[in-house]
Image (tube, coloured by chain):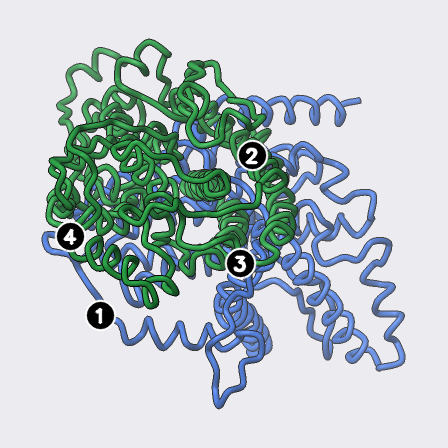
Chain colours: A blue, B green
Amino acid sequence: MIADLTETIVKILFIFSINVGFYAPILGWVERKQSALMQDRVGANRANIFNFKIIGLFHPIADAVKVLTKEDFIPEGADKFFHTLAPFLSLTPAIVTFAVIPFGGAYELWGHPVKLVIADLNVGMLFIFAFASLSTYGVVLGGWSSNNNWSLLGGLRASAQMLSYEVAMGLTLIGVFMVYGSLRLTDIGMIQENFFRWGIFMQPLGFVLFFTCAIAENKRAPFDQPEAESELVAGYFTEYSSMKFVMFWMGEFLEIVTISGIVTTLFFGAWHLPFVTDQMLVSFFAGAGPNGAALLAMLVNVVVFFAKVSFFIWLMMTIRWTLPRFRYDQVMRLGWKMLLPLALINIFITGIVLLV
Amino acid sequence: MTDSAKNLHTEQMVINMGPSHPVTHGTVKFTVTLDGETIDDLKVDIGYLHRGFEKMCENGTWEQVMPYTDRLNYVSPLINNVGYALAVEKLFGVQAPERCQYIRVIISEMARICDHFTNIAAGAMEVGAMTVFLYFVEARDLLWDLLEELCGARVTANYVRFGGVKNDLPEGFGAKTAQAFETCRKLWVDVDKLLTKNRIFIDRMRDVGTMPAQEAIAHGFTGPCLRASGVPYDVRKAQPYLVYDQMDFEVPVGETGDNFDRYLVRMEEINQSMRIVEQALARIPRGPINLDMPALRWQSKDDTYNRIEALIFHFKTVTEGVKPPAGEIYSAVEGANGELGFYLVSDGSGKPVKCRVRPPCFPLTAAMPRMMRGRLIADIVPTFDMINMIGGECDR
């Protein structure tokens, strides 16, 4: 009992510190630096402590100080309660969804079985969908309660866009579930121990569709209609400042991490290196004793998993800084008339292949 | 479904886009009446950059107007300089020396390239392609470096004088231009790859803001926007000024007159302008850059300080202004946005009685409601950019 509790708390702390403590602040820096690299610029490099600049890595700290000391502004006529609630509704799902994503295999430590996932739910993927839908509320409420026409338009766009793409995304994943026969993400991860059973080989079309839907769900360019700065000023968060703005912003970045995590788990072999099973890892580190071997294998799992996650984050950022933005009606058309039929076709083909 | 939609109580939303809004660069305000996201009506409010240009001109001498013209289209100030100088010279009935004419062609075309770079860059940025923006701004900066070396300023050039220019081309200008153009061409190719066949970009620009040729002419369109509608009107070809008739260049025309054609026309004009600059630099003759006409163009400082006649002319022209003969003229050049005309009235004194500018972007801006009615709010973004309304020139 105590051991279970400790295990869970350690895992929560680990994921929380990686996501909120590492990825959220560092991604702001990464986005600046990567866009700078792509655009022949230098990027953030001014923030310094005693003239130490370390390639601009102090900028997240400077940002934090800035937003914490800014005025927390609530516009006149805004619904104060919902205006305050919206950023929480946007950030919380982004943090919570990572609970069901496995970042390593199952091992035994001091006679206690350890699975590297916070909550090993048998409805893992449905849990993610449920919480992803919740974050829509944050955006819509933020747009609605701000008492600003631009925010309202942004909120409406967001609700329509996120709902539409959730349909296509759900249908895309049905193909994945058909192949693996499970909604439990650890099962899906386990099956991909075999390199030739990786999702990308089983469901190539599914991967493309899912990744597209996921970017749209995340509201990043080329699908950033809800905030489209040249049309709607800043869309649904036009009237947000200070920490509340940062919560939207962190929510967006954490969603990037979560999406990359899901893509890695479903399509890119989860925590596995190609042709290397967890059993091989443990026997490779056998010299460190049974517990040491398990710990080292876990470490390899975690590093491999987050390396893959970082790769997809990089990919999403590259897309974001390369492509222009769709128009709102074009996004809806793409979602309903292209992605949805393709997802259905994908299910159909998968069904035929499975039957034959 | 349709019945229930009819019975629903819906309202139109009136929304103020600007004057401080990311898309309204140049400071303008659109009062947009929205039905959902569809534009029912759009009103353009201009005048936020009104400085009383014409009134200021009436209170300054003819020469003192020159720096004001820098602030008209501040993205391509040198064309304004050239246009105004040509108009005043037309009043006098004189022509600048040949070398000066070549220099004016070179700087006009460079200014045009800068303007098109800025326009396409801003347009791409506003539909979300930030990277393209910085590529073309980098290219523009290379040309601005050249212009800075030429006249000491990047934006407020004030380089052209009546009957001449302020100074000759600096040492090694041709070689540096060739070098800058090489980089510009590379960046042009990059941007071409990023945009011209980009499905998202095409979807955003194609069939948006379409103006058929007849309507474009009726609205008074000129420049790239008119040519995009398929009318090959270019002041440089229609009424050649300076040495444009000796230059070999094409006038690109579009077919449909939508935003994508406007983009394509501008991209091609960048190439053609580079060709013109290269030809002019290759052919530029030696000789004086200023007219030898002390009543119009100051003598050199050396003369002014050492010869009494030159000193008197200097004193008279500075205190009273040059005095063109009484009369009125209209003279037009091909600005980066279209026909940039100056209508000048002189009563023989040192100050203009009237200095009226025909800004190319005013008719273009006036056509915004026509182009936007029934479209989506997101269509304002690329259309307003391709119109390239410049506040300084439209509002004056």
Q: Label 1 crowding class (10 Å Cα cut-off): few <14, some 14-19, many 20+?
A: few
In terms of image quadrants, where is residue A181?
Answer: top right
Real-space CA distance between mark 2 and mark 3, rounded to the nearest whole angstrom: 60 Å
Residue A137 can be seen, yes or no: no
Q: Nearer the viewer, residue A23 or B301?
A: B301
Q: Mark 1 belongs to which subunit?
A: A
Question: SS of the residue at dot 3?
Answer: helix
Residue sitting farthest toward the top: B214
Q: Nearer the viewer, mark 4 or mark 3?
A: 4
Amino acid at pointer 4: Glu
Please tell me whether residue B317 is drawn above or below residue B303 in the rendered image. Answer: above
User: Which residue carries the number 1 mark?
Assistant: A71
Q: Label 2 crowding class (10 Å Cα cut-off): few <14, some 14-19, many 20+?
A: many
- Residue A131 drawn at (x, y percent): 43, 49
**Quick one: quadrant of the N terminus of chain B?**
top left
Sequence-earlier tag: 1 or 3: 1
Please tell me whether residue B226 is drawn above or below residue A157 in the rendered image. Answer: above
Q: Nearer the viewer, mark 2 or mark 4?
A: 4
In terms of image quadrants, where is residue A89?
Answer: bottom left
In this rendering, do the residues under marks 2 and 4 share a single chain?
A: yes
Look at the numbered discs 1 and 4 and tell me whether their residues touch, using CB distance below 8 Å: no
- Residue A168 drawn at (x, y percent): 52, 31
Q: Label 4 crowding class (10 Å Cα cut-off): few <14, some 14-19, many 20+?
A: some
- Residue B374 drawn at (x, y percent): 27, 19
User: Which residue carries the number 3 mark?
Assistant: A98
User: Which residue carries the number 2 mark?
Assistant: B276
In-image side of B99 versus B188 (left or right): left
Sequence-earlier tag: 2 or 4: 2
